[in-house]
């Protein structure tokens, strides 16, 4: 909320003078309001089409170590969507390392592009299934990165779309990071849903316990719809009001039920889920 790299103007001008595509990089303090931090970040630059915008999503510094990981996940969702709403003609994406991508991310959402850091992997082979654009494959001396695109001209054309690139709401099958396979009793992975978002997991003949907590205060009472997919179609189970701070619901699964879907219209809601 107060720091600005004093060298950024000189660094930008040097990069652009040598024909490079330039972008701005925001490192968050995730206990702060994401929109307030974004406003501070965005106000420093007279943004032009073709400038890249990146959230450096990691929190190993003292300011972030005490922030719950569910809150860090919610920050990422809110920051990317808010900044995209302010800069619809710019590419807005996320840089993350393997720890944050696999252990903190709850939705698989990264905005317009994913910049994944897996130092020690071969360039262009980061070892993840999700689509990515940039791969940081080394941090020895300086960071070294690989890009999917064929040339600087291709990168420049991608970075400068002629029409706005709206950030879509996440689709169920776009969220492979949330939960995969079986869950041992007592484990409670957390999933963070943005407004109108959804999440899902595959289960066979299991019973789910869903716990709902509002991460941040919201003036709008929300609800969550729990639905079951039996392999041929969805059937709604029940809606749970979130007018209070917390709520829980047990969901019995029948033989053949394949997926569970959660959908919400309330912002900043976390769902802890376990099976037995």
Image (cartoon, rainbow, N blue to C red):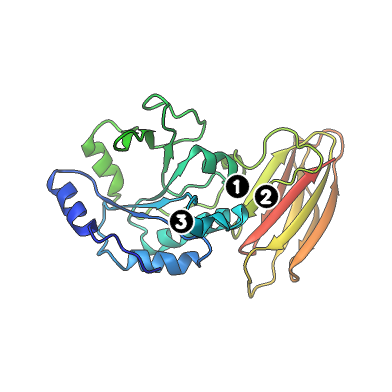
The one nearer the camera, 149 or 63, is 63
- Residue farthest front in this picture: 62
Q: Which mark is residue 106?
A: 1
Q: Are marks 1 and 2 in contact (CB under 8 Å)?
A: yes
Quadrant that contains the N terminus: bottom left
Q: Position of residue 182 (x, y in %)?
A: 75, 34
Q: Which mark is residue 190?
A: 2
Classed neighbour count for the residue bearing mark 3: other residues with Cα under 10 Å, few (<14), some (14–19), many (≥20): many
Q: Which residue is mark 3?
A: 80
164 shown above or below 130? below
| Of the image marks 1 and 3, the number of the one nearer the N terminus | 3
Instruction: Specify the quadrant of the image occupied by residue 144.
Output: top left
Instruction: Specify the quadrant of the image occupied by residue 205.
Output: top right
Element marked by disc 1: loop
Q: Position of residue 99 (x, y in %)?
A: 53, 40
- In the rendered structure, the answer to whether residue 82 lies left or right of residue 154 reads right
Classed neighbour count for the residue bearing mark 2: other residues with Cα under 10 Å, few (<14), some (14–19), many (≥20): many
> Mark 1 and mark 3: span between their CA atoms?
14 Å
- Residue farthest left in this picture: 17
């Amino acid at each position: 909320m107060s720091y600005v790299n004093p060298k950024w103007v000189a660094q930008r001008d040097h990069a652009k003078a040598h024909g490079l595509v330039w972008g701005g990089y925001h490192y968050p303090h995730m206990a702060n309001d994401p929109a307030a931090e974004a406003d501070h970040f965005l106000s420093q630059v007279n943004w032009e089409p073709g400038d890249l915008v990146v959230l450096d999503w990691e929190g190993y510094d003292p300011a972030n170590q005490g922030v719950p990981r569910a809150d860090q996940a919610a920050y990422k969702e809110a920051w990317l969507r808010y900044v995209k709403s302010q800069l619809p003609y710019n590419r807005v994406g996320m840089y993350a390392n393997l720890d944050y991508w696999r252990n903190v991310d709850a939705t698989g959402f990264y905005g317009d592009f994913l910049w994944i850091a897996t130092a020690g992997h071969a360039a262009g082979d980061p070892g993840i299934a999700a689509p990515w654009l940039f791969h940081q494959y080394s941090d020895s001396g300086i960071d070294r990165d690989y890009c999917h695109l064929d040339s600087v001209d291709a990168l420049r054309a991608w970075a400068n779309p002629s029409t706005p690139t709206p950030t879509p709401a996440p689709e169920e099958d776009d969220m492979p990071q949330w939960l995969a396979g079986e869950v041992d009793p007592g484990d409670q992975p957390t999933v963070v849903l943005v407004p109108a978002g959804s999440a899902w997991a595959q289960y066979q003949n299991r019973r789910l316990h869903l716990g709902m907590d509002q991460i941040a205060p919201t003036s709008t009472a929300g609800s969550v719809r729990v639905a079951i997919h039996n392999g041929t179609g969805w059937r709604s189970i029940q809606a749970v009001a979130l007018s209070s701070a917390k709520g829980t619901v047990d969901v019995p699964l029948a033989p053949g039920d394949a997926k569970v879907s959660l959908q919400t219209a309330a912002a900043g809601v976390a769902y802890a889920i376990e099976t037995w």
